[in-house]
Amino acid sequence: MKKILDQLANYHTLSQQEAKDILLKIGKDEYNQAELASFLTLFMIRPITVDELSGFRSALMELCIPVDLSAYDGIDLCGTGGDGKNTFNISTLSAFVVAACGQNVVKHGNYSVSSSCGSSDVLEYIGYEFSNEQSELEKELETYGICFLHAPKFHPAMRFVGPVRKQLGVKTFFNMLGPLVNPARPKKQLAGVFNHELARIYTYLLQDTDVDFSVIYDLNGYDECSLTGSMKVFSRANEAILNPVDFDLQTVTADELKGGESVADTADDFINILKGKGTKAQNSVIYANAALALHTAGKYETLTDAKAAAEVALRSGKAFDILQRLTQN
């Protein structure tokens, strides 16, 4: 590792194979905690390259416990995290709305590392039991149209780096990897990233797959559509700048998107929003992100039609009903 750290400290980059080999060794517990902390820190002070992220991704997918859910044609809605905005759980709430609209969801997620509450934190608190058993995940998709792939259940090799990430408490390149390493390898994906450069890297990597994708970078720094202003959306076909009016929605403020300070507060907000007790701003942001996912999945031809469907799914209580049945199963 010393040679690798010297190389990176002198502004050299890793080849795709070098990056893969290093992460495979991390997954086999071949480095100590100090070496891992140094390695992660070096990638926090300089941009990651396409080859490096591709190599890290390849290693994680080789190490993961795979699951085949291709028969369900699911979509993943997942952001990198690490945008520092401490919003409520927009992508997870949107996932329930998308499922309520008839599009199966195979969502990848994890506990929080750099924010107060991640998708796994809130779902576990509400009562969802994580599983990596294919039969259980298939049952959830058949019954509720949604299942959650809790990263530690499928990426056990990453237990060696988890404590270091938690102690650092800031985003690392593992945040960048999250949306790219869904063990079910869904063919549809809405991915949110925290900066413009990473959006281009994601687009480059995903164009080399058979995934129908949209990559979001909100120009105000969010890793999802915030409706606080404009955002860029990258797809296989093109890239476009979207504004709230494109969803037939109004602009919201950053303060209106703040999440809770504890898991309990976040879970209460989560349930209340799905019950239809969310604020206009909260609901609007969920409509927009769900609409992007539905449009990416090909369920609706226009964002406004997709937004209208998302609004019905939330206001009718159908999305909340899915949450109730899923967590009381």
Image (spheres, grey):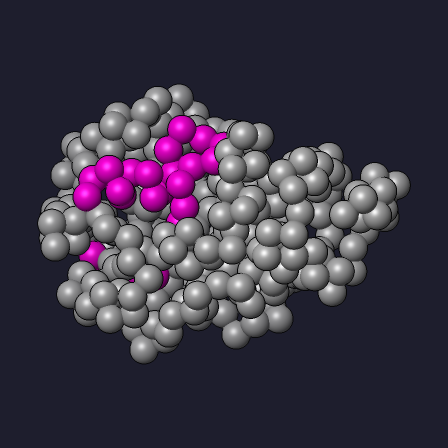
Specify the farthest residue to the bottom: 71
Residue at figure coordinates x 55%, y 37% from the top left:
165
212 or 162, which is in the foreground? 162
Q: Residue 267 is drawn in which quadrant?
A: top left
- Nearer-the-camera pick, 155 or 252: 155
Q: Please provide percent x and percent y for residue 161.
A: 56, 44
Whether 128 is among the magenta residues is: no
State which region is magenta. Answer: 100-127
Q: Is residue 219 visible?
A: no
Q: Is residue 123 visible?
A: yes
Residue at 60% from the left image edge and 51% from the top image edge? 29
Instruction: Write down the quadrant of residue 91 in the picture.
Output: top left
Q: Is residue 65 left or right of residue 129?
A: right
How far from the left and from the top, in percent, is residue 169?
53, 30
Residue at the image position 75 percent from the left and 60 percent from the top: 18
Q: Measuring 29% from the left and 66% from the top, which residue is drawn there?
A: 133
